[in-house]
Image (cartoon, rainbow, N blue to C red):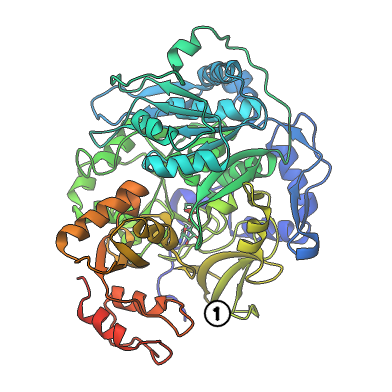
Amino acid sequence: MTDPEIYPITGDWTNASLNPKRYEDLYEAAASSPGSFWLDQATKRLDWIEPPTIAGDWSFAKADFHIRWFADGQLNVAANCLDRHLAKNGDTVAIIWEPDEPGEAARHITYRQLHAEVCRFANVLKAQGVAKGDRVTLYMPMIPEAAYAALACARIGAIHSVVFGGFSADALAGRIEDCGSKIVITADEGRRGGKRITLKACVDEAASRAPSLERVIVVRATGADVPMGERDIWYHDALATVSDICPPEPMAAEDPLFILYTSGSTGKPKGVLHSSAGYLLWADFTFKIAFDYKPGQVFWCAADIGWVTGHSYILYGPLSNGATTLMFEGLPTWPDASRIWQVVDRHKVHTLFTAPTALRALMKEGDDFVRRTDRSSLKLLGSVGEPINPEAWRWYHDVVGEGRAPIVDAWWQTETGGIMIAPLPGAVPMKPGSAAKPLPGVMPQLVDDQGTPLTGPASGNLCITQSWPGQMRGVWGDDERFFQTYFTTYEGKYFTGDGCRRDADGYYWITGRVDDVINVSGHRMGTAEVESALVLHEAVAEAAVVGMPHDVKGQGIYAYVTLNAGVTGDDELRRALIAWVRHEIGPIATPDKLQFAPALPKTRSGKIMRRILRKIAEGDTSSLGDTSTLADPAVVDDLVANRVV
Ligand code: WT7
């Protein structure tokens, strides 16, 4: 299949750092001699305490499985994000903080100020006994202190685990316990879209289920009156007694930098573990080439630091590059659908990196909200987290960017640490809806269900055949799960879980997850997690959850629930179950539709046939395929007849 639409490189972008030839050369250099390519990048791009002499040292094979990069090097990530910029760029603004409330003053934090704040926060942590290798959980609103806290951990070699502020007390407790963190950093409350998020209260609730927790550091953000118990201390009190001098801890390249929990197709969320040097280099390198960042530009990644996008493109990538990164506390749709564009104008944002779900929500409100703003500073656009449908792509390009700003459709994952496939601005012409071409060092391969590599134009399962510096290094506390999850489906390759098409021009088109993971508003949700939450309810015997198309969220959550004998499935119970899941996991897991089913379609061996459930949820009931292997084919008729529309 050839694609009708191709957007050539135009305007300012003919003078970008990369051009098509330079991209091809870089790709070729990284492919043909990865060792010298990455050693060169690592020594040029980062500041080392002990420079490495080896680059990648890895094997995806079972007998010899290991992944290491720059293993004999030593550095400190926070020093790379702060100290090395001070001499020349100490007065450059590192973070612009835009508050939730539109009229409120923004904050501008220079590299020098950020350095001092991070050193003080690091000393607060040290005073609490936090040492190298300890895990520290962050449950924070989008305020500068969240950045200080993460970088403070990096400075002293503690491993941060950021838990998105929208997760429930239960989800938080599970994540605290899984990594055995003794300390949580939170705030009295968060603010978003004019609403308050009761973070401290959630931590209190989580604490009763998280016995490892000893200390809670509370940042005063809204000034709400929150009860302080024996384990709690106010950050501002702790600050009073610490100095602002804190030398960075020398870290081995492979020492962990952070854990970030993400959903998979089975079991509890996994603690994805990232390294210090390899991760930092990937965040640094991909930020520079994917966004062609130049000093003076304001870069805005409109994600939350609770997700990997926030880690790599609000914090580590921009700060390692000495860039100015914008941190936004609010919501794109509040007070109205003009907010993003007003923030762009207020801070003269050059690059905006956001998710298709936000674009679709704004697009629905009409062009006027965009057109009434100036946006002339905006020269580059990014899209991340889920496939962008061509209609949203064109709106972003034509209406938001007025045709002058390329769109970097960045495909990657929590596991990859940073961007893997994207049309580099100035270097790769765009096709709406395609993530285009792999970055230097990324070796994608499509395989069929048997694992046979496919060449030329093809559709298949997306694997990566060679390690790259930003690759995750493990699942916290479960080495076997790391290997099992990613390297056994297709032996000797990293399997992404995504389906993908490659066209005749070698462009990659991600078609979505092929496993039991759904992508809701650019956030990953395991169907198994939602099912576990449902069956915890006393009325529920069994549950099966699938994704369904949703015009704003990309995918919505459709739940089939079988009730215990004697329980009647009425609207009240439906509402109660939906609220239950929301409370158990968090608002992002809220089922959009919930159908009571007398039974679920199962094979004779008892396996739920999700393919059929997906079709019914999609409303595609005319082509359910072969149902003859079902233990009781009549179950399907009931499901079809009672589909929730
Ligand atoms: C999954 C990873 C990327 C960081 C934020 C989400 C989907 C991500 C794209 C894209 C199509 C995309 C994939 C991937 N995805 N970016 N540009 N086009 N799909 O990270 O929560 O780890 O989710 O998001 O399905 O596997 P995540």
Q: Quadrant of residue 89?
A: top right
Q: Quadrant of residue 123?
A: top right
Is 342 situated left or right of 57 in this image? left
- For the C terminus, which image quadrant? bottom left
* Amino acid beneath label 1: Ala
Q: Is residue 511 visible?
A: no
Is 411 situated left or right of 64 in this image? left
Q: Mark 1 sits on what residue?
A: 458
Q: Quadrant of residue 622?
A: bottom left
Q: Position of residue 106 (x, y in %)?
A: 34, 24
Q: Is residue 577 above or below residue 324?
A: below
Name the secondary structure under disc 1. strand
Q: Residue at x 53, y 66 (%)?
A: 497
Q: Position of residue 386 (x, y in %)?
A: 42, 59
Q: Residue at x 37, y 34 (%)?
A: 205
Q: Residue at x 44, y 68 (%)?
A: 6
Q: Which one is in front, 196 or 435?
A: 196
Question: Looking at the image, how many numbered discs can be counted on the residues?
Answer: 1
Q: Which one is in front, 118 or 597?
A: 597
Is 373 situated left or right of 413 in this image? left
Instruction: List the single residue furthest toward the front.
Output: 566
Q: Position of residue 495 (x, y in %)?
A: 60, 65
Q: Residue at x 47, y 27 (%)?
A: 185
Q: Is residue 137 visible?
A: yes
Is 170 situated left or right of 425 in this image? left
Q: Is residue 523 above or below residue 388?
A: above
Q: Position of residue 195 (x, y in %)?
A: 24, 34
For disc 1, the neighbor class at 10 Å (few under 14, some 14 to 19, many from 20) is some
Instruction: List the single residue furthest toward the right.
Output: 53
Q: Which one is in front, 319 or 630?
A: 630
Instruction: List the single residue furthest toward the bottom.
Output: 628
